[in-house]
Image (tube, grey):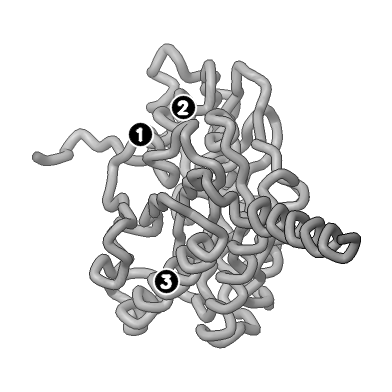
Amino acid sequence: MRRLRQVVWLAVVFAGLVLSGTRAGAELKVYISADLEGVAGAVTPEQLGPDGFEYPRFREMMTAEVLAAIEGAREAGATEILVSDSHGNGQNLLLDRFPEEVTVIRSWPRPLMMMEGIDSTFDAAVFIGYHAATTTPAGVRAHTLSSARLAAVELNGQPMSEAGLNAALAGHFGVPVVMISGDDVTVEETRRLLGSVEGAAVKRAISFHSAATLTPGAAQTLIREKVRDALHDLDRFEPHVLPTPIRLDVTFKNYRPAELLAYLPSVERTTAHSVRFTGENMVEVFRFLEFMLSYRVDLEP
């Protein structure tokens, strides 16, 4: 009888561990935002846009890394997954490669930019293929939102990467960022901001245009494992919530954008190249950023 009780007790403990690790019986909703600069092997414009000779191949690699993240999420018990195609024209991911139950957001403009579709129903956010901030002196293809136009983006006085901006928006909805992939500089930069986020460093930055990279297969395996591990341990992650109102400072590389934006009553020009916008929350900040980067008088249709 004593041995039987021990066996039953061990079975109960084991079952409890399994259930807690996979969130059995509970829905697990995961948001994935995907960029391309942080994908294994991506180092120059030749991989990053339709004019580059390697772009078709790197669309496949970006897709494969996102699919690896999806696989890891499903292994952890994910029941619903939304993917945001957030690089360049927003039309990079190969849709016919995705499981039927996954939803993909494409193209622009979108009010919430790289995080369109995020809301308080999600349990976790994952960033795939990300890169370091424009104010970071290291990192492959380091920039924030626009490498051609912007020299700095700050929230409440702190320089921001795209990961930082997007984590703050996720935090507005109470959603923690649990995992990021990219080069080693990106992973460490994000950990300094968010804490113990899981990181998949798929390449080591040598310079803005060079890296020592994992092979695609090794990178995909690492991403799958890191996503699965993070979602198995959700309780250790906290949403990144900024105090409100939120002060956004943007520094342009050119003079005229700051001059013209300052015509808006909600925008203050702080230097020759910089403007300030104060939003009640991160949603307002993101809507302003999307307007700032997307509006042109000749837009059609």
Q: Residues within 10 Å of mark 3 (few under 14, many from 20)?
A: many
Q: What's the distance in space between the residues labelled 3 and 1, CA to CA?
A: 24 Å
- Please state if 286 lies on the left or on the right of 22 as rendered: left
Give the amino acid type for the residue marked by disc 3 in the picture: Met
Please tell me which residue lies in front, 35 or 14: 14
Q: Position of residue 296 (x, y in %)?
A: 25, 37
Check contact, mark 1 vs mark 2: CB within 8 A.
yes
Quadrant that contains the C terminus: top left
Q: Secondary structure at mark 3?
A: helix
Question: Which mark, residue 283?
Answer: 2
- Please state if 113 lies on the left or on the right of 219 as rendered: left
Residue drawn at 47 percent across, 46 percent down: 29
Check contact, mark 3 vs mark 1: CB within 8 A.
no
Furthest residue to the front?
Answer: 1
Question: Which mark, residue 62?
Answer: 3
- Please state if 249 lies on the left or on the right of 37 as rendered: right
Residue 49 drawn above or below residue 197: below
Q: Which residue is mark 1?
A: 111
